[in-house]
Amino acid sequence: MVQRYQDFIMDDLSLTCLGAAGTVTGSRHLLEANGTRLLLDCGMFQGRRDIRTRNWAAFGVDPSSIDALLLSHAHLDHSGYIPRLIREGFKGEILCTPPTTDLCRILLSDSGYLQERDAEYANRKRFSRHEPALPLYTQKDAEEAMSSFRSIAFGTDFDLPGGAKARLNRAGHILGAATVSLDWQGRSIAFSGDLGRFGDPIMCDPAPIRQADYLILETTYGDRLHETRDAGEVLAEVVKRTVRRGGSVIIPAFAVGRSQLMIYFLWKLRQAGQLPHVPVYLDSPMAINASNLLGRHIGEHKLSRDDAEAMSASVEYVREAERSKEITADPMPKIIIAASGMVTGGRVQHHLKTYAPDRRNTILFSGFQAPGTPGAAIVAGADEVRIHGRTIDIEAEVADLPMLSAHADANGIMAWLRHFKQPPRRTFLVHGEPHASRALRDRIESELGWSCAIPEHRERFDL
């Protein structure tokens, strides 16, 4: 039976999808039993304006009534609402792996800082629809939120309010990413978070889950397969042809995951003599801090300490804004890796204002572009985008490396599902655009014979 959350009060176990339902962002899934509420992820909505406005809507339940939060990983579409949730009254613990705690300390602080800065810039330039423009939360809010985090090692059983027990296992994807296995009210629930790829050069493979009565499964790439072309070869071709025409390569990259993988491939190409002699810059303080965590968490990924250090030494880290401006003004060919990966903020926007109108240059994307973002528009062939209230012409070559995605594709998800010894009673398909979720549902039902549901926003299910 399916009913809307607000229709009645439940005294048994239920699931309500407060986000990442019918969209690929804002991961928030509420489990409730006998007055206890557990939240899986607490993400920020990103992308289209109508989706982003959900960040400002009422959360769906009183945040003070949520007893604990289990966090799958640090990406902002899974963690980015946490400071706001705490500001609105949440007082429970946030449980996640040690690398996720460290990454959230970086990402949430940076998110608060950028929101404050963007609000100030919008007010100064008067291009906001709101008067005054306000941040969703501040850097101080984000830093204070870290006191609520409790780190749990992979594979460790731990107790939760209401008699629930849980365990975090490796999901791949990014440093610290976990799947969640939870036993509560005599039922077992598994949450995939975001699944990584088998055979990733840096991250460990997703660990199997053998059994669950109910599964909450991401579907980001549920309708797609990753290209089989060698990513290093394609990257080398893009850099070589751009440098030959005197241009620079601008790589919008997620600060956590994609930036480190781009550095890895560029390092390997340089070792093999396949990279032109141009400087490589990582122009993102947040990505620099995230890269440094690889050395802190040796054993949580595939790199040795020596390789992690050599990889980091192969690029120039740019922290200061003045140095970033110098690099932008330098006409010589170069490679600039800068956040954000979907061109929704960060220093990459400033670089694109300079480099995008020049057809000698290349804008190289390396990850998923959510609908409604400037990155998605550029990849789709837009002639112009709006950045900081200005229209920017896109004359540069636009290239894409979809094979570098941190997400498992449809085949990868199906391979992970085949580790289950028996079908879950029901599988809930979330964190995907509708076409992706429907495509994966059809495959799961036809190939595995499982029962699937595609939740709508704020839809509730009895478990």
Image (cartoon, grey):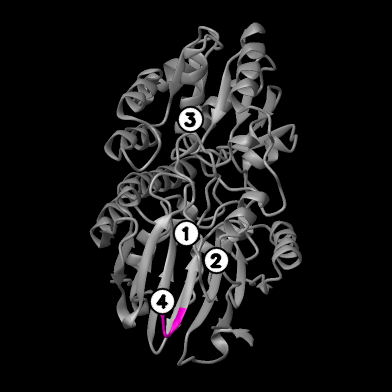
In the picture, measured across the screen, residue 76 lies left or right of residue 297, that is: right
Task: Write down the region rendered in magenta.
Answer: 183-187
* Mark closer to the chain start, 1 or 3: 1
Residue furthest front in the image: 421
Residues at marks 4 and 1 touching, judged by CB atoms closer than 8 Å: no
Residues at marks 2 and 1 touching, judged by CB atoms closer than 8 Å: yes
* Mark closer to the chain start, 4 or 2: 2
**At x 47% / y 52%, what residue is drawn?**
171
Residue identified by numbered label 3:
338
**At x 63% / y 72%, what residue is drawn?**
455
Quarter occupied by the N terminus: bottom right
- Asked whether 34 or 143 is in front, the reply is 34
Above or below residue 97? Residue 259 is above
Q: Helix, strand, or loop for circle 2?
A: loop
Of circles 4 and 2, the one toward us is 4
Q: Helix, strand, or loop for circle 1?
A: loop
Neighbours of disc 3 within 10 Å: few (<14), some (14-19), many (20+): many
Residue identified by numbered label 4:
183
Whether residue 204 is visible here, answered yes or no, is yes
- Quarter of image, res 150: bottom left
Tally of numbered tags: 4
* Mark closer to the chain start, 4 or 1: 1
Residue identified by numbered label 1:
43
Of circles 4 and 1, the one toward us is 4
Q: Identify residue type, mark 3.
A: Ala
